[in-house]
Image: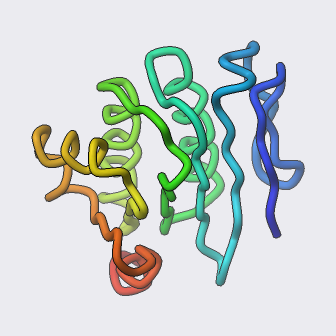
Amino acid sequence: MSAALRTTGHVRDDHLLPCAGEVIHPDEFEVAIHYPGGHAVLDIRGEVDLLTAPELGSILNALIDRGHRRIVCDLAGTTFMDAAGLGTLAIAAARLGPLGGVLAVRSASEMIERLFTICGLSTAIPMDNAIPAIAHVQNRGA
């Protein structure tokens, strides 16, 4: 199953996510969620910044609250990420850890990968740009 989520006033995945807040960068931010093998894979497109990070956080929190313990964020379509975006991913990873889960990142741009390294997140969040991060997720956590 797949669902494209656009910030056009409501963000939802009919079977998983509640409606979310107001319009935030409607043309620059989109999240599509896929569930291969029961894992949640988020294809994040556009800018993840101070304005859109709360929206991403709401999506991640809803997934975790619904019992998803293996989440992969595919950043192939992410054009920009600031500290707010990094913090949002770090918070989700920190929530999943004690639950036996894991948040992984794949297909990050060189710039975003560098930010992860500088901030020390590359040791806390598995990153793999060569092969799908889902392999790491399948081998970690509950």
| Rendering quarter of residue 102 | bottom left
Residue 70 placement (x, y as % from top left): 49, 68
Q: Is residue 13 above or below residue 139?
A: above
Residue 48 placement (x, y as % from top left): 48, 30
Q: Quadrant of the N terminus?
A: bottom right
Residue 51 placement (x, y as % from top left): 53, 15
| Residue found at x 58% / y 47% | 44
Q: Quadrant of the C terminus?
A: bottom left
The residue lying furthest to the right in this view is 14
**Residue 4 vs residue 110, the one in the foreground:** 110
| Rendering quarter of residue 15 | bottom right
Q: Is residue 124 above or below residue 88?
A: below
Answer yes or no: is residue 59 visible.
yes
Residue 126 placement (x, y as % from top left): 28, 65
Give the colour scheme of this rendering. rainbow
Answer yes or no: is residue 103 visible.
no
| Residue found at x 89% / y 49% | 14
| Residue found at x 40% / y 34% | 88
Q: Is residue 114 left or right of residue 94?
A: left
Q: How many marks?
A: 0
Q: Is residue 19 above or below residue 43?
A: above
Q: Is residue 43 left or right of residue 136?
A: right
| Residue found at x 55% / y 23% | 52
